[in-house]
Image: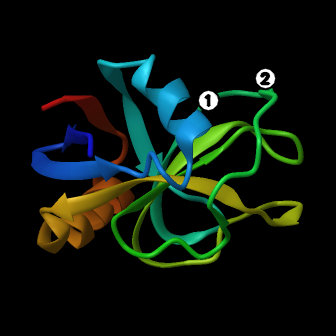
Amino acid sequence: MTFLNVKAGPFSFLARLEETLAPKTCAYFLALLPYTQKIIHVRWSGEACWIPLGDNALSFPVENATSYPAPGQFIFYPGGFSETEILLAYGGVRFASKLGQLAGNHFLTVVEGLDQLNKLGRLTLWEGAQDITVERT
């Protein structure tokens, strides 16, 4: 199993790559490490934060896809109907865009620090974009 350190705002998490369930998505993300970006609160999906990656749709297989990620699950949407993005659920989520419900590849799961996810979500909602860094342990 591969574990990654995630730092978002003032919070730290340990997350497990879902390499068996989403091997191509995980390999793609591993190639981006160390990954640094801004995370913002979602517009349509509920209690989640996301990293918008623009309008460049990527050719990607559907792997371990869900519209309802559980708290601590990261999903990757390769674009198409909406922009390319990574989403992190911290509460109830129905992954969607202005065009309706979407599904993304669940590729990363928080295994330590779940108790801080809600705080991250509230901070991002009320105080705006937060830095996020993902790197190997």
Residue 53, which numbered label? 1
x and y percentages locating residue 36 in the rendered image: 33, 22
Q: Quadrant of residue 101?
A: bottom right
The residue at the far bottom in this view is: 92
- Identified at 72% across, 62% down, the residue is 103
* Label 1 neighbour load within 10 Å: few <14, some 14-19, many 20+: some
Residue 56's tag is 2
Mark seen at residue 109: none
Residue 23 location (% of width, % of height): 54, 40
Residue pictured at 33% horizontal, 54% vertical: 124
Which residue is depicted at the point 13% across and 61% down?
Answer: 112
In the foreground, 122 or 82: 82
Residue type at numbered disc 1: Leu
Q: Quadrant of residue 28?
A: top right
Q: How would you rate the neighbour count of disc 2 (Cα within 10 Å): few for under 14, some for 14-19, many for 20 or more?
A: few
| Three-letter code, disc 2 | Asn
Q: Is residue 22 left or right of residue 81?
A: left
